[in-house]
Amino acid sequence: MRYRNHQANNLLATTNHPNGRSGHCDPRLNRSKTMSRTTIDFGIDLGTTNSAIAVLKEVAAEIIKNNDQHDITPSAVSIDKKGATRVGFRAKNVICDSNKEDAHVEFKRQMGSNHEYRFESAGEKHKPEELSALVLKELKGDVQQLMGEVVEAAVITVPAAFELHQCDATRKAAQLAGFRESPLLQEPVAAALAYGFQADQEKAYWLVYDFGGGTFDAALIKAEEGTIHVVNHGGDNFLGGSDMDWAIVEQVLVPRLLGEFDLKDFTRGNKQWRQAFAKLKRSAEIAKIDLSRSERATLEACKFADSNGEEIEFECEVSRSELLRVAEPLIIRSTEICKRVLQEKNLGKDAVQKVILVGGPTLAQYFRELLVSNLGIPLDHSVNPLTVVARGAAVFAGTQRFKGRTAAPLAAGEYSIDLKHKPVGIDSAPMAGGKVSGPSTQDFTGFSLELVNTKTQWRSGKISLRADGVFMVDLHAERGERNKFAIELLDPSGRKQKTTPDTLTYTIGAVVEEQTLPNSMGIALANNEYYRFFEKGRGLPQKATHDFRTTHTIRQGQTGELIRIPIVEGENDLADRNRHIDDHFIDAANIRRDLPAGSEVEVTLRMDESRIITVTAFVPFLDEDFSAKVVLRHKAADSDFLRKDYDAEMRRFREVKAKAADAEGESAGRLVQNVEDSPLMQEVKEAVAAAKGNPDAAAKCEKRLLELKLKLDEAADALEWPALVADARKELEDLMAVADRSGSQGQKDKAAELSGEVEDIILARKTDRLRKKIDQVQSLYWEIVFAQPGFWVNQFQRTEKEQARMTDQTRATRLLEQGRDCIVKNNINGLQSIVRQLWVLLPREVVEAEKRGYGAGLIH
C-alpha cells in the first residue's frame, strides 16, 4: 500500500511508498517501459470492498500482487491533515484508528452520483470516481513495480446490474487514472471466461453467482462451441457482504451497546455517531470473516465517546448462529433473484450444469450450504472466488487489440502494418489480414509477406501484396498456448524489411460473443408510457428510430417553452417506475418558427460498445435536427425527500389494504398480505432511518422504495382488475357495433384484431397493457364516429345549449352563426372545425391530475 503528499487539486499525483521507499527510487521503475503489446492483456476487478489486477501470460491469467504481497487491495482511500493519501489496507485501518472522517470505503456504490466524500482533517471533498481512480492508479503502480511496465490500457469490470451512469463514471475513473483505453466488461462474463477460456466445452448453461462486497449479480451463461453468451441476468446493486456487516451492527451489536452505555439517539442516520458506526462496521466485517471458520468470534475493541463525551471501549463475542440469523435473509434474497433469472428463460435447475461462485462471502461453508439447499445446483469454486473476476478480465483483455499506442515516425526503409485479425478465436486456422504502408513506397507490386510461428517454425508461405499493400493470409495455430507469429516483409529483390509491428499473436480459446445491454432503454411519453428503444440483453452497438408527436405548441423565442424528451432505463411499462437518465430538449429559443401541437418528431437513440449514448430529434416541420450526447449522472438521493416518499407509500399501503379487505376475491388481499409480511417492508423502514447523513443507505433506500412501489402497484392493479375487464369488454361491444354499422372494411378488420388482442391481454392479466388497449379501442371508435356527419350535427346542437358557460361570448356567438350556416350548406368539414373551436371555449369539468412521466412532451 502506498501514500502520497499532494496538493488539494493534485489528488492523482505520483505515488510514494511507505517506509521511505519512493517508487521513483526503485531501479525497476527507472527501467519502466510503456506498453509495447498489441493486445491489452491487463484486467482489473474494481470492487466495492476489494480490487485486483491480472495479466494474461500465454493462455493463463496471473494475479499481480500488491506491495504487501497480497492478491487483493482494499478499495479504500484516506487523506490526513498533512495531505498524505493512502490507498488500500492502511487506508482501511484509518477508520478504526481515527475519530475523524479521514477515510472512505465502498464509494463504488455512489459511482455516477453527485455525492462528494469529505475528508475532515484535510478539508477536502472528492467524487466517487476520483477515489476509484486512486485505487486504479494503485493497481497500475503494482504492475509498474513488479513488471517494470507502465499500464496504458486495461479491461475494467462492472456489475451486470450497473446502470448506465455508473458505467460512465467507471470509464471516467479510468481516464483520471491515466488509462488511454478501458473497455468495460460485466463481472459475471469475466468469471465465466476465467472458467471456460481453455476448456473443451459442449453446450452448457452456467449460473454465475457473484456475491461481492457491495453488489450481487446472477447471470445465466450459455457456453457453446468456444463462445460465451449472457442469456439473462438479474442483480441488486445494494446486496453484498457489506450489507451482512451492517446487519450484524444493527441487529446484534447496537442492541448490546444500548444496554450497556449512554448513547442518545444512537442510529446510523445520526451524523453524531457516523464514526462510531464506521468503526463498528469494520469490526463486524472482521468478525464475519472469522466466523466463516469458527463457531464464535471476538469483536475487535471499538473505542469512541458516549453521549457525555466519555470514551468507551466496546468488546463482545459474536456466534455463528447470530451471524446466520441476520445473513440468511440476504442470502435468500440473492437466491430468489437467481430463480427469477432462470424462470424468465423457462429453465429449471436441472438445465444448469453448475453454479460458479464469485466473491469473498462465498468462501464460507455455511454460505455454500445455504446455496445448495436453496438452488439445488452443484457449486464450482475451483477458481479462487476473490480473484476470478480479475483473471477473467485479463482473459478478455487478451482478445482486445490495443489501439492507443502512438506510433513513432517511420525511418527510411521502415514499414508499418495495420493488422486486421482477431487475437483470440475458436478456429485453429484463422485468417489474418492487413495493409502495409511506408513513407516512400506507394506501389507494393512485387512485395511479399510471410508469417512464421516462432515456436513451431510453421510458415505460411510467401503471400504477394496487392499494389495498395493489402494482404490476406491463413494461419495455423496450436492449442493450449499463445501462438506468436513473426512477420517477414520482403521487397521485390527479396531483401527483408523492418516492420512495426513485427509480430502478431493468436490464441485458440473461448470468446465473448458480444457485450450486452444490462437494462432496457427508451423514452418516457406524456401519458407515463415507457417506449422501449433497446431491449435488455441485446448486443452492442444499438441504434433505433421511432416517430412521435408533440403534445403542445412551443412558440419561437419564448423563454421556458420546450419539448422535453426524458430518457429512461429499466423494465417497467410505467415510465416513472424506471431510472431517469437524462432529458433531451427541443427548446423554443433554438427554433426558427412556432412548432404546433401534434407535430411529428423522429427520435433516434444510439449506443456504442462503450455505452456512450447520443440522441437526435428530427422535426420534419422545421427540417431541423436537435442532437446531443446523453449526460449519464444520477443525483444523489435526498433523505428528506425519501422520508416524504416513504410516508406517502405507507398511506397508499393502508388505503390499498383497506380496499382489499372490502373487495371480493382473495387475489388483492393476498398480495397486500405478502407485501406486509415480506422483509422488504422492514428493509425500507430501516433504510429510511439510516438515510440521513449516509449516502449508501439513502441510495439503497431509494432502490428499495421503488421495489415497494412496484409491489403496491401489483396489489392496486389486482383491485382494479375486475372493473377494468368489464370496461374493456363494454368498450369493445360499442366499437364492434359502430364498426358494423358505419365502419369501412379496414376499420372492421382492425376492430376484430383489437378484440382478439384485448382477450389475449385479459388472459395474461396485464393491467397496464389493458389500459392502453382500451385507449386504442376508444380511438378507433371515435375515428369511425367522427367520420359520420350526423355526429357533428348532434355535437353542435348539444354544444349550442352550453353557450352561457363559454368563456368568450362574442367569439361563441360568431362561431355558432358560422356553424348553423355550415349545416344549411351541408359543409361537414367546416362544421367539424367549428365544433372543435367551441369545445375549447367550454370549462374543464374535472381538473387534470398532475402529469406523470417526467414531464414528457411527446406521445406515440
Image: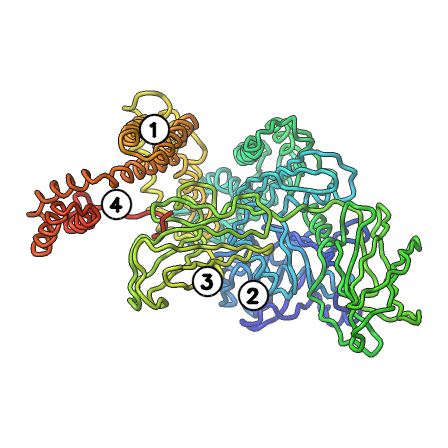
**Which residue is under mark 2?**
80
For residue 262, say whether it is visible.
no
**Front: mark 4 or 3:** 3
**Front: mark 1 or 2:** 1
Residue 376 on image: x %, y %: 63, 26
Q: Between disc 3 and disc 1, whose residue precedes?
A: 3
Residue depicted at x 70% and y 38%: 223
Q: Tell me the crowding category of disc 1: few under 14, some 14 to 19, or many 20 or more residues within 10 angstroms, Cα based.
A: some
Left or right of 541: which side holds 787?
left
**Which residue is under mark 3?**
627
- Tag 4: amino acid: Ala
- Tag 3: amino acid: Ser
Residue 629 on image: x %, y %: 49, 61
Q: Secondary structure at mark 3?
A: strand
**Which residue is under mark 4?**
849
Image position of 127 with respect to 200: above or below: below
Residue depicted at x 56% and y 73%: 7
Q: Secondary structure at mark 2?
A: loop
Quarter of the image for the N terminus: give it. bottom right
Look at the numbered discs 1 and 4 and tell me whether their residues touch, using CB distance below 8 Å. no
